[in-house]
Image (tube, rainbow, N blue to C red):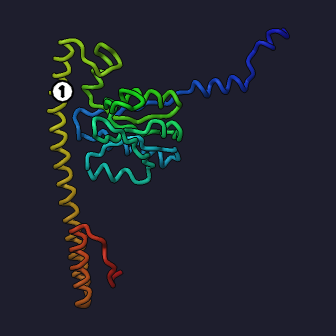
Amino acid sequence: MADDAGSRPAPDALLELACKEERGRLEIFLGAYPGVGKTYAMLEAAQERRREGADVAVGMVETHGRSETEVLLPGLEILLRWRLSHRGLMFAEMDLAALLRQKPQLAIVDELAHTNVPGARHVKRWQDVEELIAAGIDVHTSLLGFLAYNFVFTSPYSTFTVAGKQDVLTILFFLLVAVIVGNLAARLKVQVEAMRQVTRRTANLHDFSRRIAGAAALDDVLWAVVHHVAATLKAVRLPGPWR
């Protein structure tokens, strides 16, 4: 009995081992085609985690100049990118070492299928993500749908390499479907944005007519005109004499 008790690991040692073996969770945001909202949805989820009190850090995100995506970045800590020189050109890659040192609860790493510039810690970004998860960091990332099929179901597995001719045809079919669905989704997105703009203009006109109807002096009329022009041009609202 004494020998058995002496051979048992201490509770503190077991707890330390469990902490070392704890891995982060991976959440992949899939999209059929570029521009359908993968990064947008990923950042929305990140903001939700931040509001819940989680420590969120952005290791890499590509907004591609889309204003509706960029507005989701404020409030999130964005790590500086690691600049690498390759063939006389400068490239910006995710600073994996900085993320590992900081060890946030959630790391945002866009474009899982990305190939890193030579000289980076790993060849592929999915290998960066694997190291983050092994360090106990949750990761949100994005991936095109047909690339996810390639990664999971075609040989060699867990890579983005295509070896068989049949797999090439299958992936091309997926890509064709993705292009069609993506274009339809992009058109719908444009129509929704156009409807939002019409709604905003209608609301501005209604507000303008209300202010004009309630104007008691010429100054009130002038301020109503200025306010309407500013709202139409999305300028800074100017203070006026109204309530």
Is 104 left, or right, of 109 in this rendering?
Answer: right
Where disc 1 sits, the SS reads helix
Viewer-proximal residue, 64 or 185?
64
Q: Please determine whether, in this image, residue 194 is positioned above or below residue 203.
A: above
Viewer-proximal residue, 102 or 173?
102
Image-quadrant location for residue 145:
top left
Q: Which residue is mark 1?
A: 175
Q: Please determine whether, in this image, residue 19 is positioned above or below residue 34.
A: above
Residue under the image location 23 percent in, 37 percent down:
34
Quadrant (top left/top right/bottom left/bottom right) for the C terminus: bottom left
The image shows residue 42 at horizontal and vertical percentages of 36, 40
Residue under the image location 19 percent in, 65 percent down:
201
Q: How many neighbours does mark 1 have within 10 angstroms: few (below 14), some (14-19), or many (20 or more)?
A: some
Image-quadrant location for residue 9:
top right
Quadrant (top left/top right/bottom left/bottom right) for the N terminus: top right
Image-quadrant location for residue 179:
top left
The image shows residue 174 at horizontal and vertical percentages of 19, 24
Viewer-proximal residue, 118 or 33?
118
Is 79 left, or right, of 33 in this rendering?
Answer: right
Spot the residue most to the right: 2
Q: Is residue 110 visible from the viewing direction of this image?
A: yes
Residue under the image location 56 percent in, 27 percent down:
22
